[in-house]
Amino acid sequence: MTSVALAAVDTPAIAAPLSADDIARLLPHRYPFLMLDRVTALEPGISAEGIKNVTASDAVLAGHFPGRMIYPGVLLIECVAQLAAVIYGSAALVNAEDASAGVSDRVGYLAEVRQAKFMRPVYPGDQVTLRATSGPRMGALISVTGQASVGREVVMTARLVVTERDQEE
Amino acid sequence: MAPILEEITERARDRQQLCADVKALLVDRLDLDVDPTLIGDDQPLFGRGLELDSIDTLELAMAIEEKYEVTITDDETDSLLSLNRLVDHVEANRP
């Protein structure tokens, strides 16, 4: 009896690091579009940091481009958008009274990409560190600032607006 | 009576300046292809007015907050319907 009571009280709070499997429980994305390999830092509702390893076996590099593999810049933006979904998905999980409510169902849409800059190409072998910070929100719209870097070099910065779906929708 | 008239004139001038500043802020932050001095004080911001869309509301609210330290909450989005209403909101809530 005691163990049951303890298990009910001791609900594990979500904390970094999150493995790829943990991330897949927060996001609706699946292969080949689950971009994040690991979340290394997480403040639910506020900010997160994650890792994306770029590898030659990624199918997208076969076409982008043959003989000159470059990781597509738009996918770096997608990485930041997915990290943003981790930020507010984890916040929903922390705030949820019913943890069984589908957190991944809350992921909405990418609504705006503003001021995206790509400083240098990303190649196979690069480990991309992604950072996203959630900004002001209005209604379902959430502003996000994102950055991607390889080593100490910033390779991409962007400001996004993403949406969160209303559970009643 | 003269000081009161002066006061009113000064307030009107401040209001005009604030309107001009908000117009310039709008054009700058939302990359509008329009001369800020051609925007009317009563011009609607959305639809056939300045043709802003719902996604622009967030950028606009952020710009107003950064410049004037005035927030626009979900319940106050009526303040975004026209330039005058936006300026009213800024004037009423400035720190």
Image (cartoon, rainbow, N blue to C red):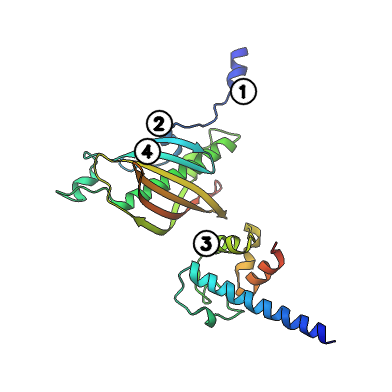
Q: Residue at x 66, y 67 (%)?
A: B90
Real-space Cα separation, disc 3 to disc 1, in angstroms: 42 Å
Real-space Cα separation, disc 2 to disc 4, in angstroms: 10 Å
Work out whether B63 lies above or below A154: below
SS assignment at label 3: helix
Whether label 3 touches label 1, CB < 8 Å: no
SS assignment at label 2: loop
Residue type at tag 4? Ile
Residue type at tag 2? Ser
Callouts 2 and 3 on one subunit: no
Real-space Cα separation, disc 1 to disc 4, in angstroms: 32 Å
Work out whether B95 lies above or below B7: above
Indicate the position of residue A166 as horizontal and vertical percent values: 54, 49
Real-space Cα separation, disc 4 to disc 3, in angstroms: 28 Å
Query: Which of the two discs, 1 and 4, labels the residue nearer the N terminus?
Result: 1
Q: Report the residue marked by disc 3.
A: B59
SS assignment at label 4: strand
Q: Badge 1: how crowded within 10 Å, few (<14), some, or many (20+)?
A: few
Instruction: Give the side of residue A148 with respect to residue B84, left or right.
Output: left
Q: Report the residue marked by disc 4.
A: A51
Query: Which of the two discs, 1 and 2, labels the residue nearer the N terminus?
Result: 1
Residue type at tag 1? Val
